Amino acid sequence: MYYQVFDEAKKHLMKRIFKIHPKKVKPVANRPINDKAASVKIIHTGRVLSVDDINKNRSSKYSYLVFDFS
Amino acid sequence: MNAYEFTDNGSRIDSEGVKVDVFAFHGTLVNQRYIVEVLHLKHDIYILQFFLKNHRLSGNRFNMLLNANNKTHVFYVLNTIVNIIEIIIKRNSLASFGFMGAPIRKETSKKLNLRNINLDGTIKNTKRFSTYSMYVKRYFPPTLFTHIDYEDTSCYLLKNNKNIYLTKEIADQYLNEIISSKYN
């Protein structure tokens, strides 16, 4: 008697477990390319600063360093 | 100029085959040790980079800030770097110097700083770039060094006027090569 009840409960439980299974995800072909981080190349160019540009925010209380190029 | 005393720790070759001179100093005002690396690149360009010794193993070692709140210390550090530059000039009179103002963590955030982040991943006008560029304008005479400003990438080059082979075009091309190898 006890085993019968146990078996039926087990069957019932197994049915419930097998109902909850994860959805299978199918691989998607032809995925749009824009969802992938694309590498971008930018050409950077520098700006040569003139003496005025350098002195623009430069306080006169500082003196330039003297370098020994010998 | 008031600066910290530094030691020359010799040189090594890094994983990309670039020669790196290593210097170190103790920031006594904040009781922190610093490591300065000088990369020898093509065309006698030397790139200076420094970080706290405590951060040496971190991938973000150039981005982190020391929460010391000590302005004198900042100037002492920069003056020490200038003293290192003087040593390099003595070794190579054609040396040109470059730096990149590494972004702080806030500046790398797309949420907070999207308008300054370029499509290739470089960051415009960082806080460090504006500080360092102001500092070099103060002390490096335009008669000896041509100042080339790459504001879009927060890079700066002090081109040695003695080095006639290094033109702005070559410097631009070389910078773009470095950026594409690092960021792409």
Image: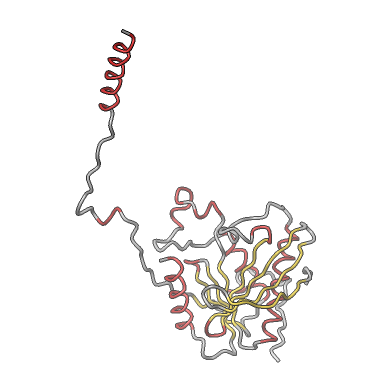
Question: Looking at the picture, how far across and down is residue B146, in whole percent?
Answer: 57, 81
User: Which residue is depicted at the point 58% across and 71% down?
Assistant: B99
Work out whether residue A52 or residue B174 is closer to the camera in this orientation and state it. Answer: B174
* Outermost residue toward the left in this view: A30
Work out whether residue B63 or residue B2 is closer to the camera in this orientation and state it. Answer: B63
A16 on left or right of A65? left
Q: Is residue B164 above or below residue B130?
A: below
User: Which residue is depicted at the point 70% across and 80% down?
Assistant: B86
Work out whether residue B168 or residue B46 is closer to the camera in this orientation and state it. Answer: B46
User: Which residue is depicted at the point 42% across and 70% down?
Assistant: B180
B57 on left or right of B77? left
Question: Looking at the picture, how far across and down is residue A15, in whole percent?
Answer: 25, 23
Work out whether residue B142 or residue A25 is closer to the camera in this orientation and state it. Answer: A25
B181 on left or right of A52? left
Question: Looking at the picture, how far across and down is residue B119, in whole percent?
Answer: 39, 61
Q: Is residue B26 above or below residue B112?
A: below
Q: Quadrant of the N terminus of chain B?
A: bottom right
Q: Quadrant of the C terminus of chain B?
A: bottom left
Question: Looking at the picture, how far across and down is residue B164, in whole percent?
Answer: 54, 91
User: Which residue is depicted at the point 61% across and 60% down?
Assistant: B57
Count every numbered label the image shows and give the total.
0
Q: Is residue A22 above or below residue B10?
A: above
